[in-house]
Amino acid sequence: MLILRCPYCGVDVDETDLHGGGEAHLKRFGPGSTDDEFHDYLFMRENPKGVHFERWQHSYGCGKWFLAARCTATLEVFGTYPAQTTEPPKEVVEAIKAKRPNWEVL
């Protein structure tokens, strides 16, 4: 079972208290974007086997959205952080590289 720590209320919660929101750190295109850019934003998502950054909502708790770094193959969680963060925090990247030295931020 997947267990994540909500960075807002500090509670460790299992996946039954959470709602997944898909891939994190996407570039959102606004008015004036091309059809191809909008298509890619809507439909083209990473689905790696390995480290992945995702959006989660603590739906049965504080209700806030946050981001998590985890391995999709092992469910190992490297860290969670507030949704307003535009890139993975240094400590999360260091936690990933400590376990996977060859990993690169995409």
Image: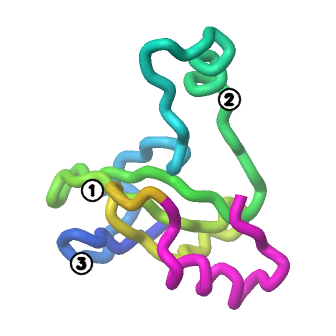
Q: Position of residue 10 (x, y in %)?
A: 24, 78
Of callouts 2 and 3, the N-terminal one: 3
Q: Type of residue at label 2?
A: Met
Q: Type of residue at label 1?
A: His
Q: Which mark is residue 58?
A: 1
- Side of 59 relative to 29 (left or right): left
Identify the secondary structure beneath mark 3: loop
- Side of 11 relative to 33 (left or right): left
Q: Residues within 10 Å of mark 3 (few under 14, many from 20)?
A: few
Tell me how the rendering is colored: rainbow
Identify the secondary structure beneath mark 1: loop
Q: Residues within 10 Å of mark 2 (few under 14, many from 20)?
A: few
| Placement of 14 over or under 63, stated as above or below | below
Which residue does the image show at 66% across and 66% down from the upper left? 71
- Side of 62 relative to 43 (left or right): left
The quadrant in which the C terminus is found is bottom right
Alpha carbon distance from label 1 to label 2: 25 Å
Magenta-highlighted residues = 87-106
Residue beneath disc 2? 44
